[in-house]
Image: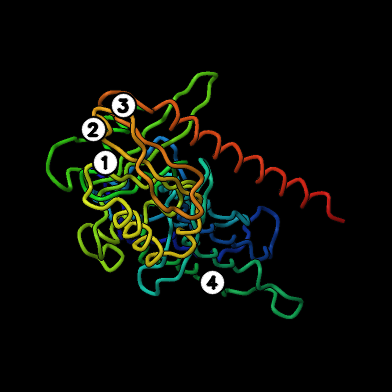
Amino acid sequence: MFIDRVVVQVEAGTGGSGASSFRREKFVPMGGPDGGDGGRGGDVIVRADRNLATLLDYTYRDAWRAERGEHGSGSNKTGRSGADVIMPVPPGTVIRDATTNEFLGELVEDGQQITIARGGRGGRGNAKFATATHQAPREWEPGEEGEARSIEFELKLIADVGLVGQPNAGKSTLLSVISAARPKIADYPFTTLAPNLGVVQMTGQRTFVVADIPGIIEGAAEGKGLGLQFLRHIERTRVLAFMIPIDAMDWQAEYDQLRREVSTYSAELAAKPHCVVFTKLDLLGEDYKPPIEAPGSFGSFAISAAAREGLEELLSGWWGQLQGMRKEQERRATTTLELP
C-alpha cells in the first residue's frame, strides 16, 4: 500500500523538576542547599531513511511521545535528560504543522533530520536560589512542559525522470521494461493507482531513477480523476517525459492538454526540461515519428516497449539531458564558490 500523506500527534518530553535539599555531613553543623536541577525533556526528531518508501507505518501509530526528564536530587545531582524520539520517514517528505499549515521543513537526503518538537527545560533546584542574604532557600522550579503539536507528513517522490501521460499511455509498460519495477499493467484506465519508482541501469555503471505517475486527465489540476493527489509527485522530478500513444486521436491536442494541466498546477514544474515520447509504435508495424510542435522540448522519441524498439535512443536522450543538467549545476556551484 502506498501511503503519501499522514497526520500524527507528537509531544516532546517534560523537563524534570528541581530538588529542594540541604547538605547533611558529619561534623558540619550547618549544611547549605544542595538540591540539583531537573533533566531536560527529550525532543521529537524526524529523520530521512532511504530504506523507507512510504509513510505506511504512521497509519498504525499516530501518536509519538518523547521521554520526560528525571527530577533533580540532593548532593547537587542533576536529573537525567529524557531520550529523544526519532521518527524515520522516506527522503522526499515535507513536514508541516497540521493546525496552522506552517511549513517546518523537508527532508531530501538520507540522514537529514529536523527537530519538530523541543523538550521542556529542567527546573532549577534550591541550590540555584542561594544568595548572601538568602542562604537557606527552599524554593525550587517545576520542569517546563515539552512542545505538543499535530504534524502532517507529505511524501513527494524523488526521481530523475517523471513519466506523464493520460491513462493507458504505456507508462507502466515502459517502466517494467527499462527497470526491475513491476507495476500493475492492464487494458483499462487508471490501472496505476500509486506512483512507482524504477532504477534504470545502463552500461558503464550509468543509473538514474524513473517515476511512473498515475494517469492525468483533463482537469487534473482542479482535482479531477486522481488529480492533485498525484500531480504533486512530479514536483521533484528533474525531467518530464510526456507520453503520447501512437493511436491517440490527436497527438498535438493530447500534448497540449498535458502541458496545460502541468502549467496550471505549477509554473515552476512546467519550466522543467521535457521531451515527447510516442508509445505503442508496434501498432503501426513501422518506424514512424509523428510530427508535433513541442516548443522547449529537448527531443521527440518513438518507442515500442512491448517490442523493445527505440528504447536505447530514448534512454540515451534522457541520460544526456540529465548529465548536462548535472554539469551545469556543478559549474554554477563552482562559480559561486569563486566569488569574493
Q: Earlier in the sequence, mark 1 or mark 3?
A: 3
Single out the mark in the foreground, 1 or 3.
1
Question: Which label number is shown at residue 141?
Answer: 4
Q: Residues within 10 Å of mark 1 (few under 14, many from 20)?
A: many
Single out the mark in the foreground, 2 or 1.
2
Residue 313 seen from this side: yes
Q: How are the residues colored?
A: rainbow
Residues tagged 4 and 3 counted as in contact (Cβ below 8 A):
no
Position of 57 compared to 71: left or right?
left
In space, the residues marked 1 and 4 are separated at their CA atoms by 74 Å
- Amino acid type for the residue under numbered disc 3: Val
Q: Secondary structure at mark 1?
A: loop
- State the image coordinates of residue 14 (x, y, percent, origin top left): 45, 63
Q: Secondary structure at mark 2?
A: loop
- Amino acid type for the residue under numbered disc 1: Ile
Residues tagged 2 and 1 counted as in contact (Cβ below 8 A):
yes
Q: Secondary structure at mark 3?
A: helix
Q: Earlier in the sequence, mark 2 or mark 4?
A: 4
Residues tagged 3 and 2 counted as in contact (Cβ below 8 A):
no
In space, the residues marked 3 and 2 are separated at their CA atoms by 20 Å
In space, the residues marked 1 and 3 are separated at their CA atoms by 18 Å
Single out the mark in the foreground, 1 or 4.
1
Residue carrying label 1: 246
In space, the residues marked 2 and 4 are separated at their CA atoms by 81 Å
Question: Which label number is shown at residue 284?
Answer: 2
- State the image coordinates of residue 18 (x, y, percent, origin top left): 54, 65
Quadrant of the image containing the C terminus: bottom right
Question: Which label number is shown at residue 177?
Answer: 3
- Amino acid type for the residue under numbered disc 4: Glu
Q: Earlier in the sequence, mark 4 or mark 3?
A: 4
Q: Residues within 10 Å of mark 2 (few under 14, many from 20)?
A: few
